[in-house]
Image: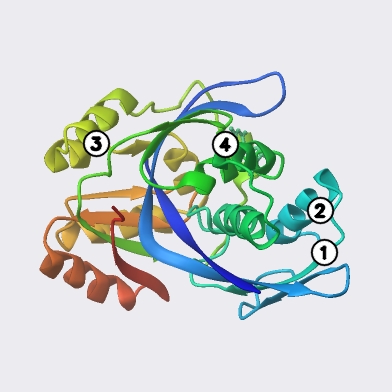
Amino acid sequence: MEIIEKAPAKINLGLDALYKRKDGYHELEMIMASVDLADRLLFEELSENKIVIETDSSFLPVDRRNHVYQAAELLKKTFDLTQGVRITIEKRIPVAAGLAGGSSDCAATLRGLNRLWNLDLSLEKLAELGSQIGSDVPYCIHGGTAFVTGRGEKIEFLPSMPQCWVVLVKPRMSVSTSSIFGSLSFNSIQHPDIAGIRQAVETDDYQLMTEKIGNALEGVTIKRYPVIQQIKDRMINYGADAALMSGSGPTVFALCEKKTRAQRIYNGLKGFCDEVYLVRTLK
Ligand code: C5P
């Protein structure tokens, strides 16, 4: 038997850090949305009791360091399973980019193996298991547009974000999320208006969304990698309605109502960075 799962990328329309918790994580408030850029994972049963990962990406480890491996191992341990599996990852989402590519692959693995092995687990249960692997995994189990709080495990579903075009630009460097959170100072933090972003999504107000989107980690990552600010400025100069860094970076996204504008930004940035994508929001 073979199962295929899509693993979409996410962008943060809003990301706020409220305080550092006793467990070392930050208490967050985020508005997340899936976009139409996805990895594809294929799951095949193996007669031998082992987990084999194959991928077309040279950036991904295929051993226990890969969250996909950890997800399969966690299910096998938790439910005492002896089945083996080969997981093939077709990688399209940039790696270590702030687009939750690794978390989305991990979530797709939990969903895919739930089907392959007939475990009949609810998405809530899969999200609970996924939170042991990474903070963004519970959201990625569900996807869509959501208000996400706590460490990332509390999820409230929202209507789809206002439909538009999204240009994603990933500069060459990879960013470590923990090091960006580690450099966050609550003296200089700029808190975005999360309630305003939520209102924009709930009322399908594209204009308000472009005015409100914001990310408390952006200043920290820009200080380390000024090219992110340059990308934002170029996007605005080429006609973006708004531009923001996603997650802990370094990917920057531009929002555009008109496809011609988005295409202009795509063409303009293509010469500046290697990894540029023009995608739609996902309903
Ligand atoms: O949970 P995950 O391993 O994906 O998180 C990566 C890092 O991001 C954590 O080690 C932590 O430093 C930081 N983080 C945080 N607060 C969160 C989520 C992540 O400080 N809510």
Residues marked 1 and 2 touching at CB (< 8 Å) = yes
The amino acid type found where label 3 is placed reads Val
Residue holding disc 2: 76
- Sequence order check: which comes first, mark 2 or mark 3? 2
Q: Secondary structure at mark 4?
A: helix
Q: Secondary structure at mark 3?
A: helix
- Sequence order check: which comes first, mark 1 or mark 2? 2
Is residue 16 toward the left or the right of residue 47 in the image? left
Q: Dot 1: few (<14), some (14–19), or many (≥20) neighbours within 10 Å?
A: some
- Sequence order check: which comes first, mark 4 or mark 3? 4
Residue drawn at point x = 84 percent, y = 75 percent: 47
For the image, the number of numbered tags is 4
Nearer to us: label 1 or label 3: 1
The amino acid type found where label 2 is placed reads Lys
Measured Cα–Cα span from mark 1 to mark 2: 8 Å
Residue drawn at point x = 19 percent, y = 65 percent: 262
Residue holding disc 3: 201
Residue 218 image-quadrant placement: top left
The amino acid type found where label 4 is placed reads Glu
Q: Is 183 or 166 nearer to us in this picture?
A: 166
Residue holding disc 4: 124
Is residue 72 toward the left or the right of residue 214 in the image? right
Q: Is residue 235 above or below residue 200?
A: below
Nearer to us: label 1 or label 4: 1
Q: Can residue 248 be seen by looking at this rendering?
A: no
Percent position of residue 125, x then y: 63, 37
The quadrant of the rendered image in which ligand 1 is seen is top right
